[in-house]
Image: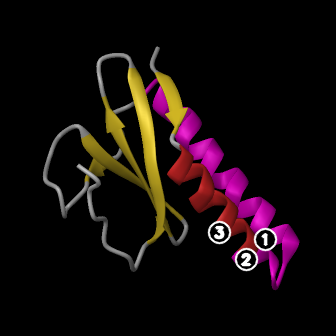
Amino acid sequence: MMKVVWTEPAVADLDSIHAYIAHDAEIYADAQIQAIFEATDRLERFPQCGRMVPEIGQQATRELIVGSFRVIYHVAADTVRILTVLHAAQQFHSPQ
């Protein structure tokens, strides 16, 4: 089983997403964050379930689409690192 690790930028993304949605509806903000966590929990058993990030084109950098958000992650030997959570309209720019 893989270990899922959230990077600091990804946690900051979640905080920003929650704050933005909560401005209008706290209950929907909570639900969106919960949906993201539920999706990433599946990565422990199925790390390859997301598609390759089109902007990168590398097998190890993948994404899950959760509602209107892209959860971008990197798969290594025994770890899945959540890199960022973006709105689906945003392009990913690799920090590498």
Which residue is identified by label 3? Answer: 17
Q: Do the residues labelled 1 and 3 touch (CB within 8 Å)?
A: no
Judged from the image, the secondary structure of the residue bearing numbered disc 2 is helix
Q: Is 27 in the magenta?
A: yes
Nearest to N terminus: mark 1 or mark 3: 3
- Asked if residue 8 lies left or right of residue 53, the reply is right
Q: How crowded is mark 3: few (under 14 residues within 10 Å), some or many (20 or more)?
A: some
At x 19% / y 64%, what residue is drawn?
55
Q: Is 58 in the magenta?
A: no
Which residue is identified by label 1? Answer: 28
Which residue is identified by label 2? Answer: 21
Identify the amino acid type marked 1.
Tyr
Judged from the image, the secondary structure of the residue bearing numbered disc 1 is helix
Q: Do the residues labelled 2 and 1 touch (CB within 8 Å)?
A: yes
User: Principal SS element in the magenta part?
Assistant: helix
At x 40% / y 23%, what residue is drawn?
79
Q: Do the residues labelled 2 and 3 touch (CB within 8 Å)?
A: yes
Closer to the camera in the image, 25 or 15: 15
Classify 78 as above or below 93: above
Q: Position of residue 78 (x, y in %)?
A: 37, 16
- Asked if residue 26 lies left or right of residue 53, the reply is right
Q: Position of residue 65 (x, y in %)?
A: 44, 59
At x 23% / y 37%, what residue is drawn?
60
Q: Tell me the magenta residue range.
A: 20-46
Colour option used: secondary structure
List the single residue furthest toward the left: 57
Give the Cα separation between the discs numbered 1 and 3: 11 Å
